[in-house]
Amino acid sequence: ALKNNSTLTNLQLGINSIRNNGAQLLSEALQTNSTLTTLELQSNKIGNSGAQALSEGLKINSALTTLGLGWNKIGKKGAQALGEAFKTNSTLATLELAANSIGGNGAQALGEALKTNSTLVTLYLADNSIGENGAQALAEATNSTLATLNLASNSIGDNGGQALGEALKTNSTLATLDLWGNSFGDSGAQALSEALKNNSTLTTLDLQNNSIRDTGAQALGEALKTNSTLTTLNLTGNSIGDNGAQALSEALKMNSTLTTLNLWHNSIGDSGAQALS
């Protein structure tokens, strides 16, 4: 139907049993369809062959702007195929690939694609085990359009956090960065803090569950004294104590842009609460 339909713009097919053969048929339709802008295929077991088929369609399609492929087990081969497609595709703005086991190699392929792609604005890569190497590859991608990057639960570690911090020092497009559950600790927080002193575009930073302690919170506090763009900072589920809370409190006396600070489930006691009050 999509090959001939000229009115449908949004097709939601999440949680079905489309698999790779269905993805192949949809890819063929994408090569001729000129109206569909959103295609959601989450949880369909399309695998790497299904992702490779869709990638062929994306090389030709010039209408699709949003593609949801989360929870499809596309692996690194699927991510690599999509990366090749993004080098030529000029319309896709949002790509959701959560929980696809793309690994570091898959992230590296997407990073290479980002260096030349000029349309992608939102990239969701949560829960993909990209590790330090994948994070470093994405950090090195000198993209001029990406505004939202979700790397939650990817085991990027200290080196990954530091690489992203370095990238943020010069990046001028990213507005939202989600690094929930990456266990990069104080060193990662310190690297990101250094970036915040220079970065002028990031508005939302999610650092939940990253084993950040007082030292990391103190570094973030120093950054907040001079940063003038961040509006939301999420530090839920870390190990920030009274000293960290006091450092953040001092920063709030000087900062005039932060509107939301989340410190749920830390180790802040009476003196920390008093400093924040």
Image (spheres, rainbow, N blue to C red):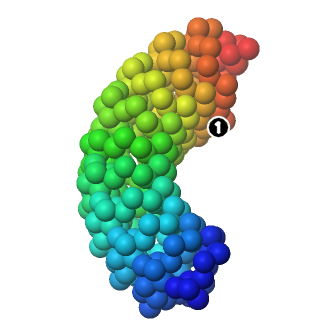
Decide if residue 217 is in sight here. Answer: yes
Q: Give coordinates of residue 200: x percent, y percent.
A: 46, 24
Decide if residue 190 is in sight here. Answer: no
* Viewport quadrant of the N terminus: bottom right
Give 139 or 194, whichever is nearer the viewer: 139
Q: Give coordinates of residue 253: x percent, y percent.
A: 62, 8
Q: Give the residue at the far right of this rendering.
A: 277
Number of numbered discs overlaid on the protein picture: 1
* Viewport quadrant of the C terminus: top right
Q: Quadrant of residue 142?
A: top left
Q: Quadrant of residue 141?
A: top left
Q: Give coordinates of residue 239: x percent, y percent.
A: 54, 33
Give 81 or 151, whichever is nearer the viewer: 81
174 w.r.t. 101: above or below: above
Dot 1 amino acid type: His
List the residue tagged with mark 1: 265
Q: Residue at x 33, y 67 (%)?
A: 85
48 w.r.t. 92: above or below: below
Q: Residues within 10 Å of mark 1 (few under 14, many from 20)?
A: some
Q: Give the residue at the far bottom of this rendering.
A: 21
37 w.r.t. 250: above or below: below
Q: Give coordinates of residue 178: x percent, y percent.
A: 50, 44
Give 35 or 147, whichever is nearer the viewer: 35
99 w.r.t. 254: above or below: below
Mark 1 element type: loop
Give 25 or 165, whichever is nearer the viewer: 25
Q: Residue at x 57, y 67 (%)?
A: 38
Q: Residue at x 35, y 27 (%)?
A: 169
107 vs 145, left or right, is left
Q: Quadrant of residue 165?
A: top left
